[in-house]
Image (cartoon, grey):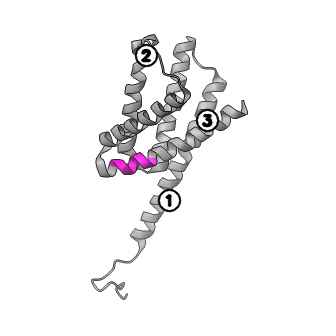
């Protein structure tokens, strides 16, 4: 179990790095071009891994609806590449993770055919609150900085504060 926990944490680190790299590429090439390059390079990499492992997926054994995951993944990368440089790493990540948590609750409800327990809802609320704290803190700091700037005396054309 510890192996899977470490693997999931490592995956989170790789996702953060990937978002940053794709966001930088997006500012130069555009979000959809960044997404195309992400998927072309990923396809080549995974194809090489499968060749080394001497295994290839049987595409006839997959339900057609399963390919929607590829569409969602490509759209995720493109949208993330677009919003990441505009919102910043922390804000974009917090919003994406919040969306994942909320959708996971809905998916579990649909698959299990029942509403989540109060304990699970409380856990989700705590996670979302924890995710939102950095955003609230950053907003407060911005407002404080703007308040300090507006309290400063106006600068004259020469750059020095006027004498009172």
Say if 53 sits above or below 139 in the image.
above
Asked which secondary structure carries label 2, the reply is helix
Please state, as top left, top right, bottom left or bottom right, where the N terminus lies in the image. Answer: top right
Label 3 neighbour load within 10 Å: few <14, some 14-19, many 20+: few
Q: Name the residue under label 1.
A: 141
How far apart, in angstroms, are the residues tagged by discs 2 and 3? 27 Å
Q: Work out whether mark 1 precedes mark 2 in sequence or the reverse, and give the earlier one.
A: 2
Comparing 151 with 36, the one in front is 36
Say if 156 sits above or below 33 in the image.
below
Question: Does residue 130 appear left or right of residue 30 in this picture?
Answer: right
Is label 2 or label 3 in front? 2
Q: Quadrant of residue 68?
A: top left
Tag shown at residue 8: 3
Q: Work out whether mark 1 precedes mark 3 in sequence or the reverse, and give the earlier one.
A: 3
Q: Name the residue under label 2.
A: 59
Asked which secondary structure carries label 3, the reply is helix
Instruction: Look at the image and say whether residue 132 sits in the magenta stretch.
Output: no
How far apart, in angstroms, are the residues tagged by discs 1 and 3? 32 Å
Q: Can you give x and y, in whole percent of width and height, for residue 95 in the image?
A: 47, 40
Label 2 neighbour load within 10 Å: few <14, some 14-19, many 20+: few
Range of the magenta residues? 20-26
How far apart, in angstroms, are the residues tagged by discs 1 and 2? 52 Å
Q: Given the current orientation, which residue lies at the most extreme right position? A: 2
């Amino acid at each position: 179990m510890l192996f899977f926990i470490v693997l999931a944490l490592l995956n989170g680190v790789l996702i953060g790095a990937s978002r940053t790299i794709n966001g930088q590429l997006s500012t130069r090439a555009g979000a959809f071009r960044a997404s195309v390059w992400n998927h072309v390079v990923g396809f080549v990499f995974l194809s090489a891994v499968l060749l080394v492992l001497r295994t290839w997926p049987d595409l006839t054994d997959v339900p057609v609806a399963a390919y929607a995951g590829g569409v969602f993944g490509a759209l995720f990368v493109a949208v993330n590449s677009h919003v990441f440089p505009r919102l910043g790493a922390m804000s974009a990540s917090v919003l994406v993770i919040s969306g994942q948590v909320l959708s996971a609750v809905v998916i579990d409800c649909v698959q299990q055919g029942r509403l989540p327990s109060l304990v699970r809802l409380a856990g989700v609320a705590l996670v979302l609150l924890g995710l939102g704290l950095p955003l609230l803190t950053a907003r407060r700091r911005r407002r404080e900085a703007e308040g300090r700037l507006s309290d400063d005396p106006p600068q004259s054309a020469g750059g020095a504060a006027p004498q009172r």
